[in-house]
């Protein structure tokens, strides 16, 4: 027989599985993710200022005014207390105001498009530091990373140096996805025909998980990659190794082949990248003979502008003709 106290505690046994959970969101290694974790903790504590007293008072009232407690004060006609009303409405109002202020501040401070102002809470970004640019393309179902300054590209593998600002420029080849490295920063959407941006930094060397946080089809669960945060020297060595390995060129033909849906795609490296490939992906003109969207929109804008100018000219000409006719017409006087 199992003792009663043990039986009552068996329902807590599944909580032991949580001991193996990786709480990376609340214990990140990048400064942006760390600030986001601070916001989560602060917001939770502020809300607990209401939740905990309410839960405590529910239990207290249930105990104090139970049927068996005949000593509790009985006031069937009571219906109002100014002090209690002020407490019930005032405390939540103050917390909502504080939460609103925090949300407004952090929304602007952690804007993914905003260039970084600091490496961590102790080190600001030096004025002469240039962010590392990484162009990200979400494919079905894999991730492509292009390093335009280094002239290399990878599939399902990302390297960046630690303590160096990174500017991700992101797009998607087909459907909307969400780029997410929990240890580094919050997720940012990738959308076809559009470019989004994420500024972030990693402060601790290691290998971290990256994945898509937006369902995009059959291979969504395997749309993952490994992110390596390394020292500057290790990053330079990795770039040199990738170039020396001779992985071929990532050109338009290679991209079209990679754009076909695959699941659990292997890691790939490219020693060179065709100039302007990312812009062609964004503007949907990778295939030869396709007009780029930015060129099409520029032509449309010029055509609309010209049409407006013609209408304006016609209006001015008509106004001038009417005025001229009015001046030239003879004046008839009645004698």
Image (spheres, rainbow, N blue to C red):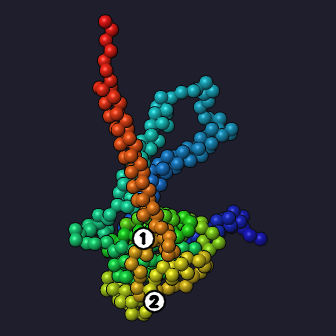
Looking at the rendered structure, which numbered label has been put on residue 202? none
Question: Would you say 116 lies left or right of 284 here?
Answer: left
Q: How many discs mark residues in the rendered view? A: 2
Query: Which residue is more in the foreground, 111 or 61?
Result: 111
Q: Which residue is mark 2?
A: 248
Which residue sits at x=39%, y=78%? 275
Q: Check the image and report above or below for 202 versus 253.
A: above
For the N terminus, the image quarter is: bottom right
Res 323 quadrant in image: top left
For residue 172, say whether it is visible.
yes
Which residue sits at x=52%, y=49%? 52
Precedes in sequence: disc 2 or disc 1: 2
Q: Are marks 2 and 1 in contact (CB under 8 Å)?
A: no
For the C terminus, the image quarter is: top left
Q: Position of residue 68 (x, y in %)?
A: 68, 39
Q: Position of residue 15 (x, y in %)?
A: 61, 67
Query: Which residue is more in the foreground, 198 or 182?
Result: 198
Mark 2–mark 1 distance (CA, rounded to whole Å): 20 Å
Query: Which residue is more in the foreground, 95 or 284?
Result: 284
**Residue at the far left in the pictured view:** 127
**Residue at the far top in the pictured view:** 335
Secondary structure, mark 2, is loop
**Residue at the far right in the pictured view:** 1
Q: Which residue is mark 1?
A: 279
Density class for disc 2 (Cα within 10 Å; few <14, some 14-19, many ≥20) is: some
Q: Check the image and report above or below for 125 versus 48.
A: below
Which residue sits at x=42%, y=64%? 295
Query: Which residue is more in the foreground, 79 or 255?
Result: 255
Q: Position of residue 298 (x, y in %)?
A: 41, 59
Res 313 quadrant in image: top left
């Amino acid at each position: 027989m199992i003792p009663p106290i043990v039986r009552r505690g068996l329902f807590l046994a599944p909580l032991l599985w949580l001991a193996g959970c990786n709480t990376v969101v609340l214990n990140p290694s990048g400064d942006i993710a760390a600030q986001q974790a601070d916001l989560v903790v602060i917001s939770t504590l502020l809300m607990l200022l209401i939740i905990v007293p309410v839960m405590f008072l529910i239990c207290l009232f249930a105990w104090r005014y139970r049927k068996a407690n005949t000593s509790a004060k009985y006031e069937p006609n009571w219906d109002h207390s100014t002090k209690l009303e002020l407490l019930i409405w005032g405390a939540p109002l103050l917390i909502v105001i504080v939460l609103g202020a925090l949300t407004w501040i952090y929304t602007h401070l952690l804007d993914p498009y905003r260039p970084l102002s600091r490496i961590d809470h102790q080190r600001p970004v030096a004025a002469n530091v240039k962010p590392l640019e990484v162009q990200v393309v979400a494919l079905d179902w894999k991730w492509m990373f292009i390093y335009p300054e280094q002239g290399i590209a990878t599939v399902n593998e990302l390297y960046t140096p630690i303590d160096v600002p990174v500017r991700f420029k992101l797009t998607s080849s087909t459907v909307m996805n969400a780029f997410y490295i929990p240890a580094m920063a919050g997720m940012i959407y990738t959308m076809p025909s559009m470019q989004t941006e994420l500024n972030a930094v990693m402060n601790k060397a290691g290998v971290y998980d990256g994945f898509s946080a937006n369902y995009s089809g059959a291979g969504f669960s395997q749309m993952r990659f490994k992110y390596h945060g390394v020292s500057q020297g290790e990053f330079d060595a990795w770039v040199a190794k990738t170039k020396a390995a001779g992985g071929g060129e990532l050109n338009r033909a290679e991209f079209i082949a990679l754009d076909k849906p695959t699941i659990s795609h292997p890691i790939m490296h490219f020693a060179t990248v065709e100039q302007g490939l990312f812009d062609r992906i964004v503007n949907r003109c990778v295939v030869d003979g396709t007009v780029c969207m930015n060129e099409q929109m520029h032509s449309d804008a010029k055509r609309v502008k010209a049409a407006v100018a013609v209408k304006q000219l016609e209006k001015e000409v008509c106004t001038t003709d009417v005025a001229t006719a009015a001046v030239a017409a003879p004046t008839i006087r009645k004698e």
